[in-house]
Amino acid sequence: MKQLLNLTFKFSLVPLGFFLLFSCSDDDSFSTVRFSSPDLEVVTDTLSPTNITLEVSPASPQASSITIIAPRNAYGSLFTTEPQLAGGEIIVPVSAGATTANFQLILLEEGIGFEDFQQEFEIIAVGPGLVTNEFEGRYFNFNLINERVQEDDLPFVENFGVCGPNGSFQLPPEGWEVIDVVQNSFGTGGFFCYTGQGAVGVGTNPFTPDGDATSGDDYSEAWLISPPISLGGAEAPSLNFDFDRRFDAPIDDNTLAYGVQISTDYDGTNFETANWEVFQPALEAMTANDPGFDNIENTGALGLEGYAGEDISIAFVYRAADAYFLATSIRVAKVRVE
């Protein structure tokens, strides 16, 4: 699968005192500094580092520097620079006699992935012997069109935005499927949006609304199934998610109260006949969570090497023996396959 990454950097001008942009030298000889072009579009499938060039005209009368900022908070997650940005600024050295200066924009594959990227840069100050125009040449827009070929669907990320502050609170998320195999008589045995503990995800809580005791035989079972995820050529794919459980209530020795099951042949129509395998690493991580506290925690990387090269569907499965005390409550957030 192929996706485009469009990185465009746009800079906004904040009025600055002229003293920030102008520095006197002993002989009052100045060189004007400017970006060599206001925009640069790079089309790439390798995310190679890009040199950003600044012109110095005439040649710099002495060794000096140019101070640049990169607005927004993507530094360190989507890109870095050389020289490195520190204190919100990139200090670019200028040699005596130089007619150009440059810094390197380094795109981070793990952050950008297969998306396009945009970034702005702005000259905010210059050192001795240098000046810059108030507007012209001070701003630079970088636009990356990412043509990397995605051989799989990774990383696959579900942050359950439908359950967030701007969400519809209607499950399931796009591409997912909810199957209520059995619903208890109160209709409380399925998944719903969960936003406790600062998390945004899904949860279960089949306890009766008014605390009414049941006969102990009011079973429910619900599945939350991901879209198909292609592991393609991934060499060491893994799954991780945030999880919490409360009020541990096992059903019996042969029935899992909750867990993750994976299928390589589920096509969206064959739920009952597809082959579903219990993903034991996830079950072990889930049961390791302390049921006596609200403590949503990440499972850590759970190896999917056994499914490398396959298209898989991941199902979060929940079962409760009744709608009263024989039910565990679970919470799931930040699902990621990478």
Image (cartoon, rainbow, N blue to C red):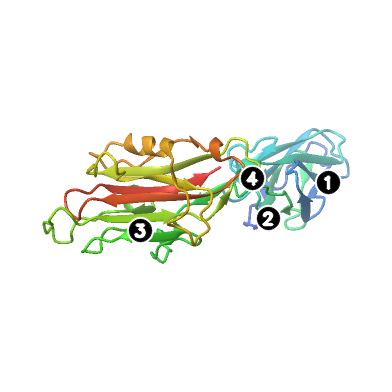
Amino acid carrying label 3: it is: Cys
SS category of the residue bearing label 3: strand
Label count reads 4
Distance, label 3 to label 2, CA atoms, is: 30 Å
Residue at (66%, 50%) from the top-left corner? 114
The residue to which callout 3 is attached is 193
Distance, label 4 to label 2, CA atoms, is: 15 Å
The residue to which callout 2 is attached is 3
Amino acid carrying label 2: it is: Gln
Q: Residues within 10 Å of mark 4 (few under 14, many from 20)?
A: some
Distance, label 2 to label 1, CA atoms, is: 35 Å
Residue at (86%, 37%) from the top-left corner? 98
Q: Is residue 210 left or right of residue 78?
A: left
Q: Reply above or below: 182 against 45.
A: below
Residue 241 in picture, x, y percent from top left: 43, 43
The quadrant of the image that shows the C terminus is top right
Q: For residue 26, which quarter of the picture?
A: top right
Residue at (78%, 50%) from the top-left corner? 35
Looking at the image, is mark 2 or mark 1 earlier in the sequence?
2
SS category of the residue bearing label 1: strand
Residue 328 shows in this picture = yes
SS category of the residue bearing label 2: loop
Of 297 and 176, the residue lying toward us? 176
Residue 207 in picture, x, y percent from top left: 20, 55
